[in-house]
Image (tube, helix red, strand yellow):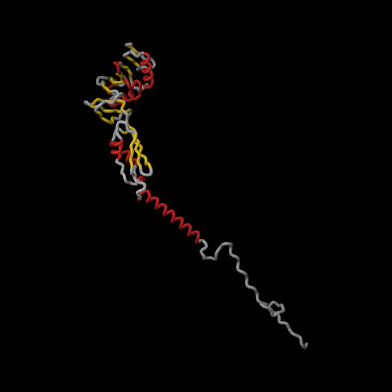
Amino acid sequence: MAGATTARRGPSGRAGGGGKGAGTPKPPRPPKSPKGAGPRGSGGGRPRRVRLLATLAAAALLAGGGTWALYGSSWLRVEKVTASGTEVLTPEQVLSAAAVPVGAPLVGVDTDEIAERVRARLPRIDSVDVVRAWPHGIGLKVTERKPVLLIKKGTDFIEVDAGGVRFDTVAKAPVGVPLLEMAADRSPSARRFDEERLLKEAVGIAGSLPDAVAKETLQVRVRSFDSVVLELTKGRSVVWGSGELGEAKGRALTALLKAAPKADHFDVSVPTAPAVSGS
């Protein structure tokens, strides 16, 4: 027909209007990335790695600085050494025996070695506690051995402690420490109990005496293992017997000394049946 127009159909079969973009399919939209995540390979984890490395570096610096402060600086070095607890010895003797390295780093001082050195050089020392007194000191707290018996050697006296250790020889007998007299040569028990065993028995007896009795005891005479006699002041004597039941014998003797102050002979070898005479 005249004047008729024919509309062109696009590939979709719809009549094309000739509009903008008509007949062109839209490209698909890319998927949304998770919130906060950067593109692959963009270094999103880098800040965390940087913080970790910084933390490790700071820790290393602190550790190095602490080590330097303890060992390399002059802040924490030994400047003063003190000694306490001495009775017969002097603090100066203990300090000399300890030989603490003044000027050395305080943290590096071997306290066990110092303690061993003091005990080896001063047998009178029973124990020593070595402590660091920050920031510049070392303290030595010593405990001396106490003699419970004396053994005569020429004009001198050997001191023996409660453990049987002969720890020193002195020219003058300490006050209040009894003298040991061994008189067991003819005893039948001498074959079974040698001098060291009898010494141990005498030490045990002397160490178990009540303080009031110990102060008045001048001599411990050992005749045999089970025949020990104490010589007291004012010419008094005590038959003690063996070292067994020492605590009970001490109580019995203390009671007898109070009950019969003028007596000169006491027998506590059987503490449940003590005897006294010469009153």
The residue most toward the bottom is: 2
Q: Give the residue drawn at x 29%, y 37%.
A: 92
Give x and y (percent) for residue 270: 36, 17
The residue most toward the right is: 1
Q: Viewed as shown, does residue 78 lie left or right of 3?
A: left
Work out whether residue 193 or residue 61 is closer to the camera in this orientation and state it.
61
Q: Decide: is 266 above or below 60.
A: above
Work out whether residue 234 or residue 231 is closer to the camera in this orientation and state it.
234
Where, quadrant-wise, is the N terminus in this rendering? bottom right
Give x and y (percent) for residue 87: 32, 31
Q: How many marks?
A: 0
Q: Give the residue drawn at x 36%, y 37%.
A: 129
Work out whether residue 201 or residue 61 is closer to the camera in this orientation and state it.
61
Give x and y (percent) for residue 215: 32, 22
Q: Give the residue drawn at x 22%, y 26%.
A: 155
Give x and y (percent) for residue 24: 65, 76
The quadrant holding residue 204 is top left
Where, quadrant-wise, is the C terminus in this rendering? top left
Q: Decide: is 121 above or below 268.
A: below
The residue most toward the top is: 279
Q: Viewed as shown, does residue 63 lie left or right of 13?
A: left
